[in-house]
Image: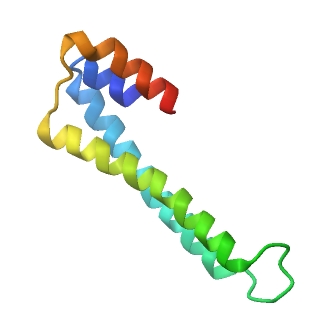
Amino acid sequence: MGFFAAVTGNDWNRANEIQQQIVNYEHQADDIKKQLRLHLPKSLFLPVPRTDLLDLLSMQDRIPNRAKDIAGIIIGRRMSIPAIMKEQMNEFVSASV
């Protein structure tokens, strides 16, 4: 939410800082995903199929990946949100989060 507030407020320094935090969090998420995959038991005694857990992990991994991609595109293009759309954009982001 802070990222879009900075973008809609044309505070590009703050937006850059938050975008860098998003990148760092995405890298941390990748490390956690890797550790989970390495330590997930391969036995037949899991309460759910292993493939279901791996599919869930992959879906969860897409969230920080998309956040990083969106923030990178907005920063790279210095996308400005038109004044008429700022309120709706912030409402949309808030509802999405």
Within the image, what quadrant is residue 47 found in? bottom right
Does 33 sit left or right of 1 as displayed?
right
- Taking the spot 67% from the left edge, 72% from the top edge, the residue there is 52
On screen, 3 above or below 83? below
Q: Residue at x 74, y 88 (%)?
A: 42
Residue 1 visible in this rendered orientation of the protein: no
Residue at image position (59%, 69%) is 55
| Residue placed most toward the observer, 89 or 74 | 89
Residue name at image x 26 percent, y 36 percent: 16
Q: Is residue 89 above or below residue 26?
A: above
* Colour scheme employed for the rendering of this structure: rainbow
**59 is higher (above) or lower (below) than 44:** above
Q: Position of residue 2 (x, y in %)?
A: 41, 26
Percent x, y of residue 27: 43, 60
Give the percent coordinates (x, y) of residue 65: 40, 55
Q: Position of residue 20 (x, y in %)?
A: 33, 45
Q: Quadrant of residue 4?
A: top left
